[in-house]
Image: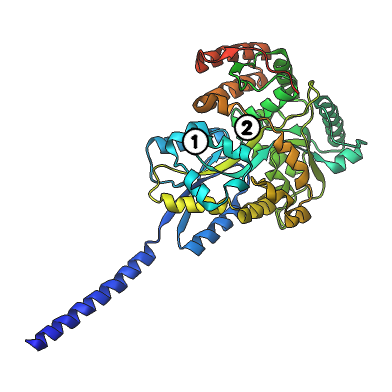
Amino acid sequence: MPKMLKFLTILLIAAFVFSGVFNGAVSAQEKPTLRVFYGSVGDIAQDEAILKRWADENNVNVEIVYASQSATEYLAQLQQLLAARSTDIDLIQFDVIWPGILAPNMLDLGPALEASGMKDMFYPRILANNTVDGKVVGLPWFTDAGLLYYRTDLLEKYGFSAPPATWAELESMAKTIQDGERAAGNAEFWGFVWQGNAYEGLTCDALEWVFSNGGGSIVEVDKTISINNEAAIRAIERAAAWVGTISPEGVTTYQEEDARRVFQAGNAAFMRNWPYAYVLGQGGADGTQETAIKGLFGVTNLPAGDSGKAAAALGGWQLGVSAYSANPDLATQLALWLTAPEQQKERWLKLNNLPTMPAIYTDPDVLAATPWVADLVPVFENASPRPSTVTAALYNDVSVAFFTAVHDVLTKKKDAATAFEDLELELENLLGSEFSVGAPPPIE
Ligand code: GLC
């Protein structure tokens, strides 16, 4: 019997060891998978490399779920997944205008942020924007502001000593350059390209025209529906007159990347776009990508309107964790890592995604590599927010109503006065009795 016992003991130990090895093998194969819902405007190829570094270091599979490049479609896709309580996405990239819409479906990152020691490193204004009823819906990943891109070589060729300070100056410079370049044989050449498709990007461009003209911010922080005013109407009429003159007819279907393609091919004098287009125009961080305008363009504030002030729409993207994620802690770690200073610095240098921490703007490496970053600080610090805080969960409906009205004017379906009269009524119905119609506040 003792022999038998010994045999059994050996068998048991062997089984134990074998099962241990087996378990080990299984857990190595089953490393956790995180799915990241990504897909903002621009080239995120280099961000894939940053993500992969974290994935390798932490033995996690990270998969990117690519979403639409149109913020409007992106939100629709995201809302569908969240409404279905989908466990298919863990980490979510989301727009600066959506905290009020997404808050119920996102985890509170406040405690993790507190524990990370990073809380005081972010711009308080961006963190405040991402906080809904005390809940930190997402960590500030990058900020954004509308800019004017211009061809330095062409300004010089046509005798202009500086980029345009007003929309009127932009119009006349764009026309002179366009006429000259066409006469010189480039039939494809246009004066000014921008975002005229019916989507969130048009809300940004049109807010810039309206605000800089003294026409307000569509709906004001004090719940005044202000869009139906003379200055706003004039601003949209002016933009509508660009279509088919200094801007192609097709601009009413353009998103950011369409405008960038035209400008980067050397076929436009001016472009409205976000900072990401800068590094791409220069051929990417290593300068090796194909571009016709490398070293031939500059970037500056958008022109001022009749108010005498320039306006830049405030943009930007955040990283949040889905409330339905099966791996919330891991996804939170990834959000913290991606928004940490080292990764923000890398994303600025490679992708020109503006950091959300003031300290990065005075970092010696950053200033040495991109001295122009210092000029951008006042632009986004003074940028005009869209009315997303005051309209919260209804923001997207407000924006859709606004860009549809503006698009109707750009495509000559309606005149601006009728479009904004109709819009005012639509916003009153949508926003309810807490909101009332009034004049925009005077611009400071
Ligand atoms: C940029 C901005 C974002 C904005 C979008 C519109 O991605 O960062 O805030 O909504 O453009 O197209």
Q: Residue at x 55, y 23 (%)?
A: 398
Ligand 1: does it lie within 8 Å of the C-beta at label 2?
A: yes
In primary-sequence order, the first of circles 2 and 1 is 1
Q: Where does the image place residue 203, in percent across and percent down from the top left?
A: 63, 27
Is residue 362 in sight in this rendering?
yes
C-alpha span from label 2 to label 1: 29 Å
The answer to whether residue 287 shows anywhere in this view is no
Q: Kindly indicate the quadrant of the structure image that contains residue 323.
A: top left
The correct choice, above or below, for 149 with respect to 91 in the image is above
- Which x, y percent locates residue 373? 75, 47
Q: Quadrant of residue 27?
A: bottom left
Q: Are marks 2 and 1 in contact (CB under 8 Å)?
A: no
Nearer to us of marks 2 and 1 is 1
- Residue shown at 69% from the left, 13% from the top: 229
Q: Quadrant of the C terminus?
A: top right
Which residue is depicted at the point 51% across and 17% down?
430
**How has the structure been colored for display?**
rainbow
In-front residue for pair 173/379: 379
Label drawn at residue 134: 1
Within 10 angstroms of label 2, few (less than 14), some, or many (20 or more) residues? many
Residue found farthest to the left:
1
Mark 2 highlights which residue?
A: 201
Residue 312 horizontal/vertical position (percent): 71, 32
Question: CB of residue at label 1: within 8 Å of ligand 1?
Answer: no
Say which element carries label 1.
loop
Q: Is residue 29 left or right of residue 168?
A: left
- The three-letter code of the residue at mark 1 reads Gly
User: Which residue is pictured at 74% across the width and 57% down the height?
Assistant: 365
Q: For the N terminus, which image quadrant?
A: bottom left
